[in-house]
Amino acid sequence: PPLSEILNLHDFEAIARRVMPEKAWAYYSSAADDEITLRENHAAYHRIWFRPRILRDVTHVDFSTSILGHRTSMPIYITATALGKLGHPDGELNLTRAAAKHNIIQMIPTLASCAFDEIVDNAQPGQVQFLQLYVNKDRAITKRLVQHAELRGIKGLFITVDAPQLGRREKDMRMKFEAEDPAEVSKNDKQGEVDRSQGAARAISSFIDPGLQWSDLKWFKSITKNLIAVPLILKGVQCWEDALEAYDQGMAGVVLSNHGGRQLDFAKSGVEILIEVVEKLGEKRGLSFPNEKFQLFVDGGVRRATDVLKAVALGATAVGIGRPFLYAFSSYGQEGVDAALTILHDEFEMNMRLIGARTIKEVVRGMVDASNIHTH
Ligand code: FNR
């Protein structure tokens, strides 16, 4: 169907399922084990309701905000998803170009299909990009990547901490990942040897170090020259205790995420974890959120601006979105991603008016009722 018939982010998934190569669909859509967390990620938002405010002159609404000090047009970013070329020959560049057009931040995955430098080269002057980091057992490789990224102007380093081993994504495991796969991670960015017998995810991930621990974080600080320019964020924090530890260890923030349900099945949704993190870090460290010095991000299952507004009301600085953009470019290339961002933009405008918020600062805790969510 023509793009003009796409009305929301769910539509991209339905179309991608029909038009995408089977292998790409298996890799993008799959999640761990019985995919309970995958479904929960979106379902959790169904348990949070608005408490809108009225009569506030919402003629003009502005939902631009800043993430780690960088202005963006909406409180969202494009999160890291590996192997962009499985879905489209331009791979991650579809995201880079659409992000530039809409003033959105893109997080580049360690395991992009396009070369890291190609993705950075395709950004517009001043366009902000982050890097997602899988930490290699061979730290020299990781150090080279981090230092190169800093040199290339990357504005934030998101260390993935929820994947000491890749989860079982059975849909994907039934597919073989071929030697000459055009989607394969760029040669320059290769992280090590691969086992091709069990799907794309297994093939590309055997280099990841399961030995990574809290005491390693000091090392990351030591290899970046300028921590203001390249703040460290942990991606994949799943309880308040670890969020507190990240804060105490001087991280710039955390992403409350279960990797889109692709790692531990029965991990709770990020938005539910957000509630306990805000509560406990307030109690134990006197922090209030959103907070400039320690920023909370959420990802997983976000499909509507209303989902984002709920997370923002609960204290998130911004929210990451993954699969919808993959499905959008797999079906329509960059134009699909442009359309997805335009849809979100329109949804923000309307829903800001309907909840009675003129700016992101006015999207406050009192605007949501999360009493259906039980926190730990
Ligand atoms: C991911 N994600 C991910 N995360 C990461 O830290 N490194 C990676 O290489 C990838 N790769 C990846 C591939 C694919 C196909 C998906 C769907 C996801 C996880 C991603 O950053 C994010 O946590 C989730 O995708 C968010 O959930 P939604 O928006 O996809 O529901």
Image (cartoon, rainbow, N blue to C red):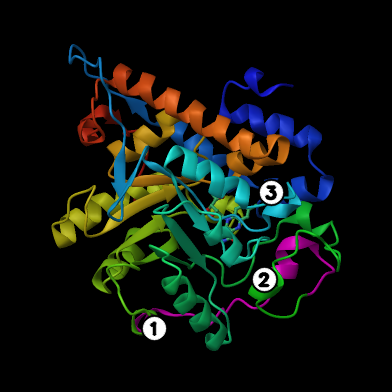
Disc 3, ligand 1: is the CB inside 8 Å?
yes
- In the picture of the structure, the residue carrying the numbered disc 3 is 28
Q: Which mark is residue 205?
A: 2
Q: Residue furthest left?
A: 286
**Extent of the magenta region:** 195-219
Asked whether the residues under the numbered discs 3 and 2 touch, taking CB atoms below 8 Å apart as contact, a structural biologist would say no
Give x and y (percent) for residue 93: 61, 51
In the image, residue 259 above or below residue 338 = below
Mark pair 1, 3: CA separation: 33 Å
Asked whether the residues under the numbered discs 1 and 3 touch, taking CB atoms below 8 Å apart as contact, a structural biologist would say no
Q: Which mark is residue 12?
A: none
Visible residue check, residue 119: yes
- Residue 81, quarter of the rendered image: bottom right
Give x and y (percent) for residue 352: 31, 23
- In the picture of the structure, the residue carrying the numbered disc 1 is 223
Q: Quadrant of the N terminus?
A: top right
Verify whether residue 210 appears in magenta: yes
- Amino acid at pointer 3: Tyr
Looking at the rendered structure, the number of numbered marks drawn on it comes to 3
Mark pair 1, 2: CA separation: 23 Å
